[in-house]
Image (spheres, grey):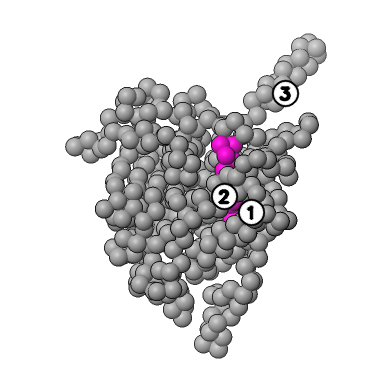
Amino acid sequence: MKLAVAVLVAGLMAFSAQAQEYFGDMRPDAPELAARGQLAVGVRTLVAEHVDQLDVLHVSDATPNPRYNRKLTLEVWYPAQLAAGQKEYTVYTDVLGSGPNDPKRPNTPFQFNGRAARDASPAAGARYPLVIVSHGYPGSRLQMSYLTENLASKGYVVVAIDHPESTRADKTGFASTLLNRRLDDLFILDTVAAWSHKGSGNFLSGVVDADNTALIGYSMGGYGALNTVGAGVSAVAAAYVPGGKLAVNQQGNAGYESQRDARIKAVVAFAPWGGAHKVFDAAGLAGIRTPTLFVSGDQDDVAGYQDGVLPLFQGAIHAERYLLTYVGGRHNSAPNPPSPAMWSNFDDFQSYAEPVWDSRRINNINQHFVTAFLGIHLKQQPLQPYLDLAPLAADGTIKPDPVFWKGFAKRAALGLEWRALKAQ
C-alpha cells in the first residue's frame, strides 16, 4: 500500500513538472501565427533616467514649474545566443494591488515563470526592429509577458516600461499619467536608439534597429501611444491637468506637432482610454497617420466601446487601421492571465481576468494578429492575407469561415469581429 502511494505521488509530481504552463503557451485552438518563433529569447532589466522633468503632481501657485528626475525601469526581451546549458527560464516578480496604502489591496509581491534566459548574450549578426510596450494605469512592465516573449522569439527587441507614478507599486495622481506617457515613450525611443549605436557600451549596441519602431499600449498605454503618433488631446482634456500643463500634448500646439517621430511605423492600441471622456476630438484623431491595430472588448466598461474605442478607430481617418473586437469582452483584452496569487482577492483577480473569455485564448489571438500586423509594417513580411478578413455582415454579425479567416482552424473564430478601414 505504501509503495502504491509513493508511486502515485511520484507520478503526480512528474506530471506537474511536465504540465508546467507559461503565459503565452499555445492552446490547441490557437491561430497559426501565435506560435513562438525560432529564436531563443533573453531578458534583462535596465533603468533609464529622464532628468529635469516637470513634476506635475506638485504644481502649485507657489511652485508653478517643479522639476524632478524620472527613473524608468525597463524589461528588455531580445533574440539571444544561449550559453552551453543555459535555459529559456526566468522568474518574474510583480506586485498585486492598486497602488500603495490600500488596506483592501495591499501591494504584495507575486512571481510567475517566463520563457526567457536572464542576462543571456544577444544574438549576433542582425539588427532587430524595436517594440516599446506601455502598460495600463496601474500596471507594470511585466503585464504582457506572454506577448513580449513571443515577439522577441520572432526577431524583435521589446522594451516594456514601468511608468513612474502609474504602476501598481507606486500609483499616484492621474495627471502624471496623462502628461508623461507620450514623453516617456519618446524618451525611451531616443534612449534605445542611443544604446544601439556602435561603441555605446550597452548590450544592445548593434542589435536594435530603432528606425523601425512600433508602440504597443494597453488602456492608458494605448492613450499614450495614440498621443505619441499624432492624436493631440482636446482643449477639454487639457483642463484635466493643473496649470494648463497638458498643452504640450495638445492638438494644434506647434511644439507638439513638430515632435511626430517618423521612426514609429506601427501602433497596437489595446483598449485605449480617452474616447468616452472626450480626450480626443475629430481634429486630434485626424492627426494619426501611423498604421494602427485597435483591440477591444465590446463590453469595455473602463475605456468604453461604442462611445470609446470604436470612435477612436473611426476617427483616425488618415491612418490605415484595423479593429479586432472580442464580443462579450470587457477591458482586460491585453494582460497576462490572472496568477494563482490573485485568486484570494476578487479585485486583484478582476484586474487581469475576463468574465466571459478565457485569458489564454485572448493571449493567443493577440499574438497571432500582432505578429501579422508588425510583420507587415516593420519587416515587410507577406502577411497581409492574415488581415484581409471577412468584414462585418450587413446584419452587423460576423460569419467566421476558415476560407476568410486565414490562420484560424474551423469554428475557432467564433466571438470575434474584424473591421478594416483604409487611410483617406
Q: Secondary structure at mark 2?
A: strand
Q: Decide whether residue 375 is among the magenta residues.
A: no
Residue picked out by circle 2: 209
Q: Point out which mark residue 196 bears.
A: 1
Q: Amino acid at mark 3?
A: Met
* Residue plotted at (29% across, 46% down): 421
Q: Position of residue 403 (x, y in %)?
A: 32, 24
Badge 1: residue crowd in 10 Å (few <14, some 14–19, many ≥20): many
Instruction: Please say if the residues under marks 3 and 2 sit with CB atoms less than 8 Å apart.
Output: no
State the CA–CA distance, disc 3 to disc 2.
44 Å
Give the magenta-colored segment's residue range. Answer: 152-163
State the CA–CA distance, disc 1 to disc 3.
45 Å
> Is residue 172 shown above or below 80?
below
Q: Point out which mark residue 105 bears.
A: none
Residue picked out by circle 3: 13
Q: Position of residue 378 (x, y in %)?
A: 48, 45
> Does residue 89 appear in the picture of this structure?
no
What residue occupies the far left of the structure in this picture? 394
* Residue plotted at (60% across, 63% down): 164
- Nearest the eye: 282 or 8: 282
Q: Amino acid at mark 1?
A: Ser
